[in-house]
């Protein structure tokens, strides 16, 4: 009898062990199945996202082609006066398509200071451009010494030599950083490159970012007064001779004739210029046609978003020459939204 009971207990224990083993295997298989399904789900989502972003990239390329065609066929044939009248406000175009939409913002691209003007075409320091850069910073409220120091640091960053200008910063200053690096010794690829400069904090960078643009070496600022708004007066003041002429710049813009000035003689005859004197004026840099066009494109396609900006030169032969392409929201040119900043 004892043998039968013992054998029965052994059978029950074996069945219990088999059951527990089976349950454990099933639990492991379930966990593995869940993990596999998660991997499959994420893989499918990743493939879909890759496809969406690839399609958004194609739409962004289409935006560039459309902008070039639009500038060449619609804007360039207009007279200078008509172009300026048309672009006194940014032109916004929306194009819906299956799965999303594309928006293009076209504006006059001349209302910024050319950072390429700090050096000449041969890569040496340009005194006029450096002085105008200092004018801009002091008009924005920078102390004169800090404005001069930043101008010197930027000149050393983009000029071709390794000789430090007064208050500048060359390779030795940047090699002590972590990680170490050297100066570019060429013009800025984008305004964002300013963040690399010695002594420029993020707060100071953001304060001057809306007024700057990256241009070729020796390319002086060319400011179209016939499309400017009062918020652009800081840049115009650099061509009038500095911070003392900001109010004159504001008055010139706010009192602009409906048809625009059209020529420098009309500007000089404006009431705002009564009694105007400045040894550092650069009237030859005031233009009356939007010879630079800035285009900001935003593409939304399903789960993907692409932001790309373009700058075009408007050519006399009726063409549009792409001079800059930048991807991402950092490339958008910030807009000053508070008019009270003009009086600070």
Image: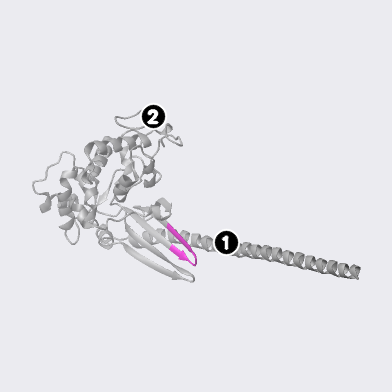
Q: Crowding at label 1, few (<14), some or many (≥20) Cα neighbours within 10 Å? A: few
- Which callout, 2 or 1, points to the residue nearer the camera? 1
**Disc 1 designates what residue?**
46
Corner quadrant of residue 35: bottom right
Please check the rendered image and state whether residue 300 is part of the magenta-colored stretch, yes or no: yes
Q: Crowding at label 2, few (<14), some or many (≥20) Cα neighbours within 10 Å? A: some
Where disc 2 sits, the SS reads: loop
295 left or right, relative to 85? right
The residue drawn where x is 16% and y is 38% is 279
- Say which quadrant the N terminus sits in: bottom right
- Residue stretch in magenta: 299-307
Total number of numbered discs in the rendering: 2
Applied colour scheme: one colour
| The one of 304 and 35 positioned closer to us in this rendering | 35
Query: How much space separates mark 2 and mark 1, taking CA atoms?
Result: 47 Å
Where disc 1 sits, the SS reads: helix
**Chief secondary structure of the magenta portion:** strand
Q: Position of residue 154 (x, y in %)?
A: 33, 38
Q: Position of residue 135 (x, y in %)?
A: 22, 42
Q: Position of residue 102 (x, y in %)?
A: 42, 65
**Disc 2 designates what residue?**
162
* Outermost residue toward the top in this view: 163
| The one of 206 and 215 positioned closer to us in this rendering | 206
Instruction: Of the two numbered discs 2 and 1 on the same chain, state the one appearing first in sequence.
Output: 1
Corner quadrant of residue 15: bottom right
């Amino acid at each position: 009898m004892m043998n039968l009971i013992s054998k029965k207990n052994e059978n029950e224990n074996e069945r219990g062990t088999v059951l527990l083993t089976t349950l454990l295997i099933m639990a492991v298989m379930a966990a593995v199945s869940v993990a596999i399904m998660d991997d499959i789900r994420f893989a499918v989502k990743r493939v879909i996202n890759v496809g969406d972003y690839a399609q958004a990239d194609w739409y962004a390329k289409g935006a560039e082609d459309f902008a070039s065609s639009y500038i060449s066929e619609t804007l360039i044939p207009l007279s200078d006066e008509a172009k300026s009248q048309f672009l006194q406000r940014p032109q916004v175009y929306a194009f819906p398509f299956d799965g999303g939409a594309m928006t293009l913002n076209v504006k006059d691209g001349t209302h910024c200071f050319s950072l390429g003007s700090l050096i000449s075409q041969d890569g040496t320091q340009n005194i006029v451009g450096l002085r105008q850069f200092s004018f801009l910073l002091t008009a924005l409220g920078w102390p004169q010494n800090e404005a001069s120091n930043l101008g010197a640091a930027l000149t050393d960053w983009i000029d071709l030599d390794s000789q430090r200008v007064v208050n500048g910063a060359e390779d030795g200053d940047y090699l002590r950083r972590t990680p170490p690096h050297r100066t570019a010794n060429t013009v800025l690829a984008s305004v964002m490159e300013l963040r690399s400069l010695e002594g420029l904090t993020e707060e100071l960078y953001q304060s001057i970012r809306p007024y700057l643009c990256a241009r070729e070496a020796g390319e002086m600022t060319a400011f179209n007064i016939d499309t400017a708004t009062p918020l652009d007066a800081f840049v115009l003041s650099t061509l009038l001779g500095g911070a003392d002429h900001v109010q004159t710049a504001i008055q010139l813009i706010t009192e602009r004739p409906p048809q625009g000035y059209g020529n420098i003689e009309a500007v000089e005859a404006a009431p705002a210029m009564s009694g105007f004197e400045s040894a550092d004026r650069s009237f030859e840099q005031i233009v009356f046609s939007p010879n630079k066009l800035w285009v900001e494109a935003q593409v939304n396609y399903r789960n993907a978003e692409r932001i790309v900006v373009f700058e075009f030169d408007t050519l006399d032969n009726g063409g549009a020459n792409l001079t800059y392409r930048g991807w991402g929201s950092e490339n958008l040119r910030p807009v000053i939204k508070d008019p009270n900043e003009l009086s600070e």
